[in-house]
Image (tube, helix red, strand yellow):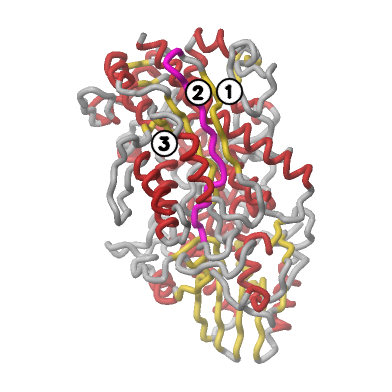
Amino acid sequence: MSQRLLTKSRFKIAMDCPNKLFYTRKKEYANTQLEDPFLQALAQGGFQVEELARLEYPEGVLIEGNDWNYDLLAAQTEELLQQENVVIFEAAFKFESLFIRTDILVKRGNHIELIEVKAKSFDPVDENLLVGSRGGLKSDWKPYLFDVAFQRYVIRQCHPQWNIKSYLMLADKSATSPVDGLNQMFRINKNVDNRTGITRTINSLEEIGGKSVLGKVAVDEILNDIESGKYACYDNLSFLESIKVFSEYYVADKFFNAPVSWNCKGCEYHATPEEEAEGKKSGYKECWSGQQSWTEKEFGRANTFGIWDFRRGSKLFEEGKLFLEDIDQDDIGLKDEAGKISRTERQWIQIEKSVTGDTTPFILKEELRQEMSSWKFPLNFIDFETSATALPFNKGRRPYEQVAFQFSHHSVDASGTVNHESEYINFEPGYFPNFQFVRELKKALSKNNGSIFMYAPHENTILNVIFNQLQDSDEPDREELQEFIKEISCSTKSSVQKWEGDRKMIDLCEVVKKYYYDPYMGGSNSIKAVLPAVLNSSEYLQKKYSRPISEIGLSSRNFDPNHIWFHFEKGNLLSPYKILPRLFEDWDEEQLDATVSEMDNIADGGAALTAYGKLQYTDMAEEERLAIKESLLKYCELDTLAMVMIWEYFREEVE
């Protein structure tokens, strides 16, 4: 059995919640986070960035293999460090019960560069990148900074005579890719026998003009503040105290018993009933039953964890109010807003219906009717699929610059006839699709003057991005495309130019929030929650969509005429999203979406984003390429059909 040592990854886990140290790496505990390293690499691109970073140090020596033999890894490192000058990738250091591996370690005598590589992006001109205006560490950077602090601490214990300079190496948003296909020069390969799972198709930066899209940020000043105790690590524990305490508990495999809190709502050690039936343990339940004496009765009671956009949850928890039956209107600060469901009204409706067991939907019918009366037929429903990666696909593009590679477009005329009007997908490797994407969208939406719908503001954001990309381009129809974008969108807060188009897209998600709530949605307004809700409560939709699409006159560009959208499984409604074919056999789309959502500038659609990344492989078999394309087209078509179904439900309710 391998030694129990506090590694930097376990230290980061403990910073979030020390109780997780007891559950981590134990297969008997359920874990909702994506744990497959290949899928994580595919979704996030972190290992690709690490391999690019290594090319900046061609003399670097990689220590690999023996992943769980900590003493051997540390010994191999110490042997290399006998050299006066050396660069080591994955250098290992062990001090007492602590163990780390560094991404890049540069040794020049006693002068050391400690470099931690992350796929996160930065802007070199941002003076407040890591520390906020009030002097605290920015929450999204804190785990990375404490990670490097932990590494520096362990190295100093091993080599106190060293002068260490510490850096984060990140994707530089001001840099542009020197070549086409930079992303795919670092191939994610499940069968590669190395830690990163990356196969490089280049061996030096000179092969791409000697330029990278990465940059270094010096962090020693902040690390000094961390070590001095200026910034707390966990609760009231300083950095040095936390190292001592966390290591003691982890090495002894002892449960920390950190107090449960409202933050537990996001715990990944939460087993589903199905997993529990299969024998999986729930770390979440063990914490709450141990500290609060909860039984299955309490676990079955509705609590504030599920309330939509609830900003008072932590305060109420401190007051001893967690269960919905204990919450009153004053607790949520209930405020009315004329003509719509306010945020707090929506929360109160959710609470009331949960407490009373009322499963009926709540609709402001007259207000919704007035809203819908302003919509102009034919209605146009659109959905975009986009990608943003640390390493760009195309020459001249920047890290995490948005790429719009696909859209779907459904239309509905005044008689209610539904057509899958048009679609676009780019799956040509090395081609920057954004400008052609807008040309195809213009062609599709210029055929009528009807209202245009999106679900959530993603589409508007993307069109703003492309507007700016066009501004910097020499496309012959640049101004024409920009005018089209301005016609169907509105400028974002960060836009230099300001506009609001006469035909700007209507956000169907905002319509849902303003006028409709169904307990079936729980605390979510995502289209994947709203669609099952409207299907579940609408006899009209059930009757219509339980028949083959050919029988109901529904046009489709990607589904078989005999395809049926409405299914029950064991007496429960099966969401149409659940019957879509997986993009790849071993992918879990929900976990991928959750993983990708933590990246820069990404909303949802992790599976689609990741599939597009795979499509950029130039040597992929045509059969596999077409299979991915077919799945993506189905995925996107359902998104716009789902919008149509929501509209159909609203129409039936108000009429």
Q: Which residue is rendered at x = 74% and y = 59% of the image?
A: 2
Q: Which residue is rendered at x = 33% and y = 43% of the image?
A: 490
Dot 2 amino acid type: Leu
User: For this view, does 329 lie left or right of residue 418?
Assistant: left
Between the C-alphas of marks 1 and 2, the distance is: 8 Å
Q: Is residue 545 above or below residue 307?
A: above
Whichever of callouts 1 and 2 sits on the residue coming sooner in the sequence is 2
Q: Is residue 497 above or below residue 372?
A: below
Q: List x then y, in percent, for residue 317.
A: 35, 36
C-beta proximity under 8 Å, tags 1 and 2: yes
Q: List x then y, in percent, for residue 16.
A: 48, 52
Picture quarter containing residue 234? bottom left
Check the picture and name the quadrant holding the N terminus: bottom right
Q: Which residue is mark 3?
A: 456
Mark 1 or mark 3, whichever is nearer to me: 3
Q: Which residue is mark 1?
A: 575
Residue 97 appearing in the image: no
Secondary structure of the residue carrying tag 3 is loop
Q: List x then y, in percent, for residue 344.
A: 28, 29
Q: Report how many numbered discs are placed on residues in the image.
A: 3
Q: Residues within 10 Å of mark 3 (few under 14, many from 20)?
A: some
Nearest the eye: 591 or 225: 591
Q: Is residue 166 above or below residue 119?
A: below
Dot 3 amino acid type: Ala
Q: Which residue is mark 2?
A: 531
